[in-house]
Every structure is written in structure tokens, then in C-alpha cells.
Image (tube, rainbow, N blue to C red):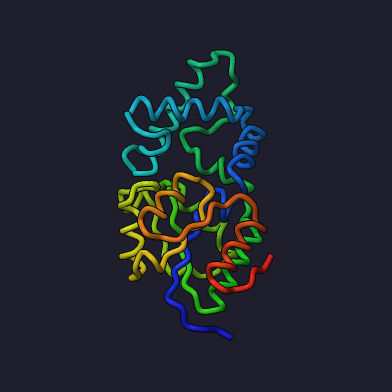
Amino acid sequence: MTTRDDTMVWFDFGGVLSPPLAELFAAYETKTGISPAALQAAMQAVGDDLGAPPLAPIELAQITEREWGARLREHLAAADPGLDLTRARLETFGEQWFDGITVNTAIAAALRGLKAHGLRVGVLSNNVVEWERFWRPIIEPAGPLDAVVDSCLVGARKPDPQIFAIAEKTAGVAADQCILIDDLEQNVRAARQSGWRAIHFRTNAQASSELSRLTGVAAVL
């Protein structure tokens, strides 16, 4: 039985609807031989070159995936000239990064449960234009969404307060009607400062329990 509720629950993609980020970096190392530490350092270096946080230039569509990947390759090679980059398709990064990745089934089930009880659900993600065709199929098991707010399409990214205002306008709800589930503490803090309720995702059980408490919908794991 469904009930009417004006609550809008926003799920992060990377690390919430997808496996944890540590698992994604480990999977990429298996595919390419590039360690998480080396890759993260290269991402940081690209951001530093452009005077921005590590992924901001590509998550705001200020540079293309191909340019970003080429910059990654340059920094990886400079940091470790002996590193074998022949398996890494850095200029088309998203295709290789998301290959073999599947949805977090517990959180997908929680999303469907909320929807079945009359709550509205959406994805609020820092993401990349060229990656949409890869990450969208991953979350299909979660079912239909009421809204998607993607940083690369709206010109703002978490934790910028502007993206929370955009999400509210997109959904047609007030700040106190929004709940964010995100694995990054800085994004959770920013959401709360914008008047949202928010859950810092650490485990499926913990996040589902907190979500049940905030919404009154029993968790489905």
C-alpha cells in the first residue's frame, strides 16, 4: 500500500548506489595495474594544474574526458616513468572504470521500497558527461527515478550549496523535505548546512537503519 509523502530522498551514485569507492579503485587496479594511490595522486595533480579540486574540472564539464585522461597519463608517467600504462584506456576512462561494476543491491532495494511507499526518489551525483551511458545502466535495478541532478549538466557540484538549491527546484520541494544519502562527510555536512536532512553512508545496514528512522519506511536489505 502506498501513502502520500512530500519527502524527496536523494541518493549519491558513486559509493552509495555503486560499490564503495575503495572497491572501485581496487577493481581499476586489477584492470590496469595502476594502484589507487598513484591514480588518486594523478587526479589530485590534474586538479592542481587547473586550480580546482581533483575531479571538479571534469565533473563540471570544463574539460572533456579525453583531455582529462591525457593529463592523467602525463602525470602518471612523470611520477613513475617505469609504470606500465599499456592496459589503461585513460582517454576513455569511464568505459574501463565502470566495466563489470554492478549496483549496490541493498541500496537499490531500499530505493524501490521508498518508492513503493509513496516517497519520491532521485540521484544527486557529481558525475561526468561522457560517463552517463555507463553509470545509468548500473542503477537500472533501482527502478524509476523521479529526478536526476548531475553536476556536469547543471554546472555545480557537491559540496557547493548551489547544487542543493538546484535539486530543490528540480524536485519542487523545500530544503527540509530533502534527504541526502552520501558517502562523503563533506557533502553530508554541506547538505545539512543547506537545511536538508542527511545520512553519512558507511554501511548498507547503518544507512538503511537511519533512512528508516527518517522516513518511517521499514528497511529492506
Which image quadrant for residue 212?
A: bottom right
Q: Is residue 106 left or right of residue 211?
A: right
Q: Position of residue 36 (x, y in %)?
A: 59, 30
Which image quadrant for residue 112?
A: bottom right
Residue found at the far right of this picture: 221
Q: Is residue 141 left or right of residue 134?
A: right
Q: Residue at x 53, y 74 (%)?
A: 115
Q: Position of residue 131 (x, y in %)?
A: 46, 48
Above/below status of 145 relative to 45: below
Which corner quadrant holds the C terminus? bottom right
Above/below status of 26 relative to 195: above
Q: Position of residue 209 (x, y in %)?
A: 63, 63
Count of labels shown? Answer: 0
Nearest the viewer among 34 and 14 is 14
Residue found at the far bottom of this picture: 1
Q: Residue at x 50, y 22 (%)?
A: 76
Q: Residue at x 55, y 25 (%)?
A: 38
Q: Residue at x 55, y 78 (%)?
A: 117
Nearest the viewer among 206 and 127 is 206
Which corner quadrant holds the N terminus? bottom right
Q: Is residue 68 left or right of residue 82?
A: left
Q: Position of residue 218 (x, y in %)?
A: 63, 72
